[in-house]
Amino acid sequence: MDLRYPERVARFADEVRAFVRKELPPEIRDKVQRRQKVSVEEVKLWQSKLCSRGWACPGWPKEHGGPGFDALERMIFDNVTNEEGAPTVVPFGEVMFAPVLFAVGSPEQKAHFLPKIRTLDYWFCQGFSEPGSGSDLASLRTRAVLEGDEWVINGQKMWTSGAHNANYIFMLVRTDPDAKLQEGISMLVFPMSTPGVTVRPIVTMDGEHHTNETFFDNVRVPKTAMIGEVNKGWTYAKLLLGHERTSIARIGQSKRELGRLKALASEQSTNGLPLMNHAPFRDRVAAVEIELMALEITAMRAIAKGGSPGVEANLLKVKGSELQQRLTELFMDAAGPYGLPFDPERGLENGNEPIGFDEAASLGPNYLMTRVVTIYGGSNEIQRNIVSKTLGL
Amino acid sequence: MDFKLTETQILLQDTANRLVRERYTFEERKKIVAGESSYSQALWNEFAELGLLGVEIDEDCGGIGGSFADLAIVLEAFGRGLVVEPYLSTVVIGAGLVGAAATGERRKDILSRIAEGKLKLALAHGEAKARYVLEHVETRARRDGGDFVLDGAKAVVLGGDGADTLIVSARTDGGTSDRNGISLFMVDPKAAGIHLRPYRNMDDRGAAEISFENVRVPASALLGPLNGALPLIEAAYDRGAAALCCDGIGAMAAMNAITLEYLKTRTQFGRTIGKFQVLQHRMADMAMAEEQARSMAYLAVEYATEKEAAVRGRFISAAKVQISNSGQIVGRGAIQLHGGIGMTIEYVAGHYLRRLTSTEKMFGDIDYHIGRFAAA
């Protein structure tokens, strides 16, 4: 047994780190590190740098235009880029939809979509959840009916995150209302500009617009909008949610946040001592660091095991998301009274001076918004159900 | 041992609850929060008419001469209603300080105006580097002839955005962390040399960063003893913490009630989600956390006005720790049990999380209070 990364992988990590430090514009890195909004243009700029280096879409095989990393390189790449403050990949196209295309997309669909997902010319959102279908996703009711050569879609999707920036959607629809719940679902892909699609913003409790509800009123799309076979959409969704769970562990991001937490706690003082020297606080930070170490090694073990992600994906999602939340809680502890000011409209985005210390304004909103990570991508209750089933319970 | 309310208290509770239920609906609150000012003057006037601003103020000053236990009843109702008006800064802290430190006609005049709804106060004490250490005061007031001249800056001043008068702490003697040498001054926020940056806190209450540059006040602005204001400030902060305990149990009770209702009505997998054991257990934990918090809020009320600082501090700290911990269990749990809908700003649950999180951060956080309790 050897827990160290192989020499070639260690060299690769250095190479990725050097690349990010050279190519990532400092103003974008600063925004990411200070948890400010990164614009669509800035994400696209970073993606173009990755494209030039041949590292865009790190999870993709060479044949589809990816770098063809092995699983370990992939994890290292994600961790290092995140640690270094690169913008988070918008997962819907690259991480979630593309693997479904690899598996079951037609040659025409692959040729059409993959290059444009890679450059982010196609910016995707996902239409899965509905008002009555959250954890119980298979109960979804948005209908698609075949009329001649067209699917006609009617219904409503919830939590269509980023739909206001997206020009494409992939979504689950009910195509056979008489079949068993999971067996009457299909997956469609089409432009958001299709007549009959309406996006309404949902503002979350951090005061920001991340997500939406999206309405479909007699939306007509061609038969070619179908991904794979009719009524097989549930199988594809499961495939894709497995991918979402792996990236949801956010190990690199948590490492970055842990580093910043320690830095902040060293700057803040209480009773004349740095907060980081205050034993109860220091010990809570240590506990998170230990849990994060365990998570990284667990991820390495999952990779070493090979094959498609199994129950490890559920574990990584549960532990990774809880760590993210714990970190935001500790940031709030570190902030002290400056965790209170909360005024997005009068804040940095509008050119005002920060209230309190430099990154204080982002901590409250980030704490609130991060409550969602144990809810989305399959709630942690659902994940634990799956884990317990694999244990034979 | 007696946990029953008196007849007067039951009447007060009815009044406060009815006000919140009828006049402070979530929709009404949204309008207030969206406004330019952080509070509704119209509602503030109603509070005054109902006697809610003078609960603890003597009858000869226009109040109803009640106790902190009476005030606690209003505070719980206001927590339930997520009331953003500057009740904490004016009625709990401001009136409390003036009641304890002012005398004679001055005392009567200020308290009467508070009870009438004509005066809002804010205690400007905390500073950027002080964190929760109350004796850490860098702002200075130097004597100049018959006046005092203030220089310094105050951080996260609760109610500072809309106060008619600020009660400003400043060092008139000693070094930054000395217990002696701190004095309080009543200062007009419009005085020359004051820069005030208003904003909202996470719970939508108003606050401000306030700086003082050569701000001249007459000697008569002094409130309480020269150099000896720290015990007054400590007592005021303990009253604030005790008040937040009461506000907190109101918010927790409301949060648990709406979450329970959601578990009984939201259907997934062909049944109401309250039928799933893992959600039942979480709800049970939240209900138990609320009960523990309520018990300690009663303790806080009992000791909020205790004169013996060490005794008072120990019990107030214990209560504040319990309320904060329970607030996390209830606040975070409720969002998780609601799922996505709990995340939206249009739904009330997130606002209770914001209230409970703010409650935890004001007048000392968990680390501060657990440390003070352990050291007591």
Image (cartoon, rainbow, N blue to C red):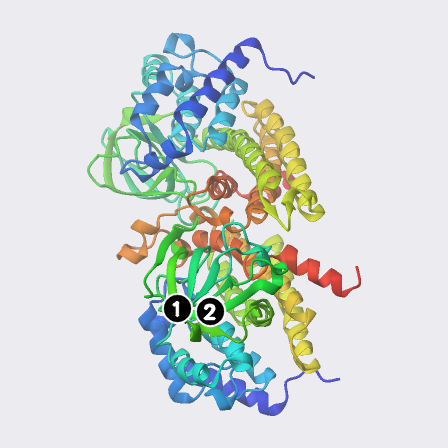
Query: Separation of disc 1 and disc 2 at Cα?
Result: 9 Å
Residues A287 and B340: in front is B340
**Which percent across, then down, holds residue A212?**
40, 55
**Which percent across, then down, holds residue A39?**
33, 67
Q: Which mark is residue B231?
A: none
Is disc 2 on the same chain as disc 1? yes
Indicate the secondary structure of the residue bearing disc 2: strand
Q: Quadrant of residue B92?
A: top left
Left or right placement of residue A177 versus residue B165 in this view: right
The residue under the point 21% across, 41% down is B193
Which chain is indicated by disc 1?
A
Q: Which numbered disc flags the more N-terminal residue, 1 or 2? A: 2
The residue under the point 67% across, 81% down is A307
State whether residue B151 is above or below residue B1.
Answer: below
Task: Name the residue that disc number 2 marks.
Answer: A188
Indicate the secondary structure of the residue bearing disc 1: strand
Can residue B376 be seen here? The reply is no
Q: Badge 2: few (under 14), some or many (20 or more) residues near its Cα, within 10 Å?
A: many
The quadrant of the rendering that contains the N terminus of chain B is: top right
**Which percent across, then down, holds residue B36?**
27, 38
Q: How many marks?
A: 2
Which chain is indicated by disc 2?
A
Q: Amino acid at mark 1?
A: Val
User: Looking at this rendering, what residue extends furthest in the front direction?
Assistant: A148
Residues A58 and B314: in front is A58
**Which percent across, then down, holds residue B208?**
33, 41
Tell me whether circle 1 and circle 2 mark residues in contact (CB < 8 Å). Answer: yes
Task: Name the residue that disc number 1 marks.
Answer: A221
Q: Badge 1: few (under 14), some or many (20 or more) residues near its Cα, within 10 Å?
A: many
The quadrant of the rendering that contains the C terminus of chain B is: top right
